[in-house]
Image (spheres, helix red, strand yellow):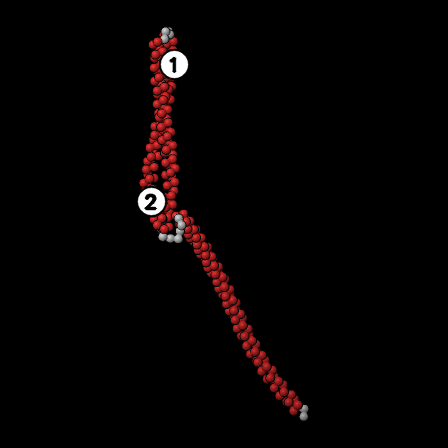
Amino acid sequence: EEDSTNSFICVLKKMKELRQMKKVLEETEEAFKERMEALAEQWRHLHARTAQLKAHVLTSGATVKENERLQAQALKKAKEEKEENSKKESELLRDRGELEALRKQRQKLAKKLLKYSLFKRYMEDVVENSQFCNIEDVIDYYKALVRTRKDLLQSQWWHRQMMEQSKVLQEQISAEKEAEMLQCKNDLMQLKESLDQAQSDVRQWEARWAELQDRAARKAVELKSLNMAIHSLFQ
């Protein structure tokens, strides 16, 4: 359906181009006809002038020198007019070529128009069997759908961009959290090692303290025994 609508839009453009081309072709044909008539008139004028000069040379009693001068002027004028006519003929040939090219282009456009007329009938059937009032409404609706699709694609693109950015941010946060957890784990292990070392030191000091208390108790017993022995000697 989208291809058909595009084809019909192309048909409308081609129809407009064909009308413009037809107008240009008609104007070119008219100009070509006018140039041909002007060229024919110039040739008639040249022939008339030549005949007048010949008649003048034959009937006048001018001298040979005057006749030669008039003949030279006539030849010069004839040469100039011939060059001008050659120039105009070249222009006419060029215009004829352009006219032929325009005719061929017109035929080509006419063939395309005939080919695309099927799409026009198709669009007319669409209008007839739908809620649209005319073909322009169908085209406007199609353009609106194209704009909506474009906006939707743009929205989807932005959504994908946001999702990708969110994913990157989430991965970054996860990496930072993992790094923090690893650091906390290392700190906890160091604290545990410090605690184990402290507990080991406490046990060592407790054992040392018990040993000192035991030695002090033995010294106290020895001191008591010594005091009792001394006391017995003085009785």
Q: Is residue 6 above or below residue 23?
A: below
Residue 100 located left or right of residue 157: left
Q: Mark 1 to mark 2: distance in Å?
A: 64 Å
For mark 1, what is the residue?
73
Residue 20 % position (x, y): 39, 37
Residue 2 % position (x, y): 37, 50
Residue 217 % position (x, y): 60, 84
The residue positioned farthest toward the right in the image shown: 234
Residue positioned 36% across, 46% down in the render: 8
Which comes sooner in the sequence, label 1 or label 2? Answer: 1
For mark 2, what is the residue?
117
- The amino acid type, in three-letter code, at marker 1 is Gln
Residue positioned 35% across, 28% down in the render: 33
**Between residues 63 and 32, which one lies in front from this camera angle?**
32
- The amino acid type, in three-letter code, at marker 2 is Ser
Q: Is residue 95 above or below residue 139?
A: above
Q: Is residue 25 visible?
A: yes
The residue positioned farthest toward the bottom in the image shown: 235
